[in-house]
Image (cartoon, rainbow, N blue to C red):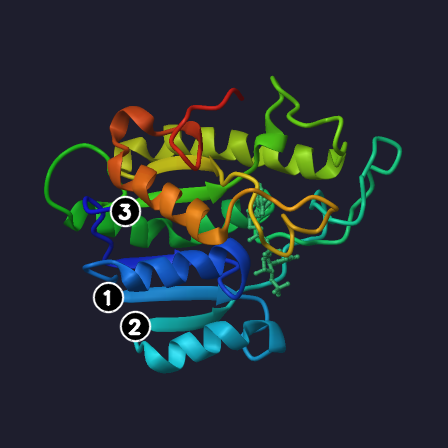
């Protein structure tokens, strides 16, 4: 993580799970970001209490309300979401395909500005980056852990998110913006821990791993699908 130098960052779904983990880890960096914009859909709600507590101690955290993403193609821990039931499922996630698309378009001018204002050539996460939180479940080639749960809507939304990342990487390369999509591992969050098995990874393990990967990736990695340890995953 030593190579990562972030001046400002927007984290979506920042009130719990992996999003909150990212906020906590950004704060612990040797050079924490000057601004951490922590987006969540209910900033004053009960589920944002931990984030509110953090923000009261760290003035570089700005909590911002971010709109609800449409409840299409999202994993519900208690539902297998099989093919017949491929209709919209209740949400339990911080990302769905339309939201990263709209938000990255909205923030494009700022991302471009950040890239232009950073020294050096090539792409890096210290310059300007879009990091989409996907899942190995969205791999069309592997259709990972199909036996454990079909979760068709979820898989489709993540496959779409992966395509979006690829398109973003092609469209934004010339503007100096690196784009990747991540599988965070199977993590002990409300979503990851919703079934009968305990996930092997803590939020800390996963976020630390992803930040380490983010600190090392460069132009050659833009438009790739990576896991929390930096392994390239099949589309
Ligand atoms: N945990 C895993 O094992 C795992 C594995 C693969 C991929 N992922 C991906 O990692 C990302 C984060 O998941 P997580 O495990 O951290 O989940 P989590 O702990 O359940 O947190 C979910 C977050 O998403 C927000 N959210 C839920 N529905 C939403 C909606 N309709 N519109 C806007 N925000 C919504 C929640 O906000 P509220 O508090 O307001 O509900 C919360 O901030 C997700 O994209 C997930 O697919 C997780």
Q: Is residue 102 left or right of residue 7?
A: right
Instruction: Please state which of the two labelled residues, at mark 2 or mark 3, is closer to the viewer.
Output: 2
Image x and y of residue 172, in percent: 34, 35
Q: Which mark is residue 60?
A: 2
Residue in view at x 10 percent, y 38 percent: 120
Q: CA distance from mark 2 to mark 3?
A: 22 Å
Q: Which mark is residue 34?
A: 1
The answer to whether residue 124 is above or below residue 49 is above
The answer to whether residue 22 is above or below residue 74 is below
Q: Residues within 10 Å of mark 1 (few under 14, many from 20)?
A: some
Residue in view at x 70 percent, y 54 percent: 91
Q: CA distance from mark 1 to mark 2?
A: 6 Å
Q: CA distance from mark 1 to mark 3?
A: 18 Å
Q: Secondary structure at mark 1?
A: loop
Quarter where residue 146 is shown: top right
Q: Residues within 10 Å of mark 3 (few under 14, many from 20)?
A: some
Q: Nearer the viewer, residue 129 or 225?
A: 225
Image x and y of residue 59, in percent: 30, 78
| Residue underneath mark 3 | 112
Q: Secondary structure at mark 2?
A: loop
Q: Nearer the viewer, residue 192 or 89?
A: 192
- State the residue lying farthest toward the bottom: 56
Asked whether disc 1 touches disc 2, contact meaning CB atoms under 8 Å apart, the reply is yes
Q: Which mark is residue 181?
A: none
Residue in view at x 25 percent, y 31 percent: 218
């Amino acid at each position: 993580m030593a190579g990562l130098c972030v001046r400002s960052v927007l984290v979506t779904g920042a009130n719990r799970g992996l999003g909150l983990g990212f906020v906590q880890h950004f704060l612990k960096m040797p050079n924490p970001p000057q601004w951490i914009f922590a987006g969540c859909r209910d900033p004053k709600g009960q589920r944002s209490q931990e984030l509110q507590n953090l923000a009261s101690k760290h003035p570089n955290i700005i909590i911002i309300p971010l709109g609800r993403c449409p409840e299409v193609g999202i994993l519900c821990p208690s539902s297998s979401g099989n093919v017949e039931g491929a209709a919209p499922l209740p949400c339990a996630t911080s990302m769905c395909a339309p939201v990263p698309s709209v938000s990255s378009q909205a923030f494009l001018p700022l991302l471009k500005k950040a890239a232009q204002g950073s020294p050096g050539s090539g792409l890096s996460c210290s310059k300007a980056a879009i990091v989409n939180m996907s899942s190995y479940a969205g791999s069309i080639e592997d259709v990972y852990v199909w036996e454990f749960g079909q979760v068709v809507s979820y898989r489709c939304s993540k496959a779409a998110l992966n395509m979006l990342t690829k398109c973003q990487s092609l469209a934004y390369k010339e503007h100096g913006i690196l784009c990747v999509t991540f599988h965070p591992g199977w993590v002990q969050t409300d979503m990851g821990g919703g079934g009968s098995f305990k996930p092997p990874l803590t939020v800390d393990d996963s976020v630390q791993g992803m930040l380490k990967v983010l600190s090392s990736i460069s132009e050659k990695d833009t438009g790739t699908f990576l896991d929390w340890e930096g392994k390239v995953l099949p589309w």
